[in-house]
Image (cartoon, grey):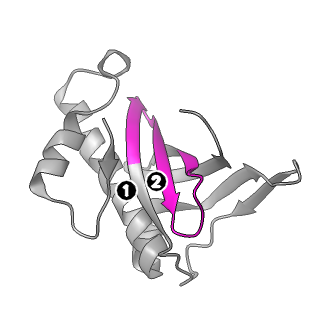
Amino acid sequence: MVYAFTRSLPVAFVALALFAGTASAQKSSANDFSDRKAVLETIENFYIGDHTGSTEHKKLSMHPEGAYRYVDKSGKYRESRFRVDSDDSDDQYTEELLGVDIFENVALARLRLEQNSRDVPEYKLMTLHRVEGKWLITSISWGFGVTP
């Protein structure tokens, strides 16, 4: 299933997203439901922060020691630490959640971004960890022209 985040999530999205994912890879308990909800809220907060520049939402979603990781167009590996205090924003794309897998205290979210300025989608993998009881994004990796 594919879900698009919007500025305000409709109730149907939340209900569907809470149950989406790879059932065989996840716990079948009440904790899974609350973990899935918390992971989805963390991802939503990230995109609110990224689209609006809200440092409050960035701090709610990103570990301050986390990093972006990618290979640039020349083929070189690049890494940069999250800047949770930055009010930079980017509203030139729309994101779709492709799936979330949760394994105890680590989660992986797969997303596709449609850029307004180019025809080729971008794909992101977000790694989240439960840190002191709170889900936070610890790593974001991405690439272009990936076939899902």
Task: Give the residue pinned by disc 2.
Answer: 136
Task: Give the residue pinned by disc 1.
Answer: 42
Q: Residue at x 40, y 40 (%)?
A: 98
From the viewer's side, name the closer residue of 12 and 87. 12
Instruction: Look at the picture and state if 3 lies above or below 119.
Output: above
Q: Residue furthest bottom?
A: 87
Q: Is residue 129 visible?
A: no
x and y, in percent, of residue 103 in the image: 42, 27
Q: Residues within 10 Å of mark 1 (few under 14, many from 20)?
A: many
Q: Tag 2's secondary structure?
A: strand
Instruction: Determine the main secondary structure of the stretch shown in magenta.
Output: strand
From the viewer's side, name the closer residue of 93 and 97. 93
Residue 54 is drawn in which quadrant? bottom left
Earlier residue among tags 1 and 2: 1
Magenta segment, which residues? 97-125
Image quarter hosting the N terminus: top left
Measured Cα–Cα span from mark 1 to mark 2 = 7 Å
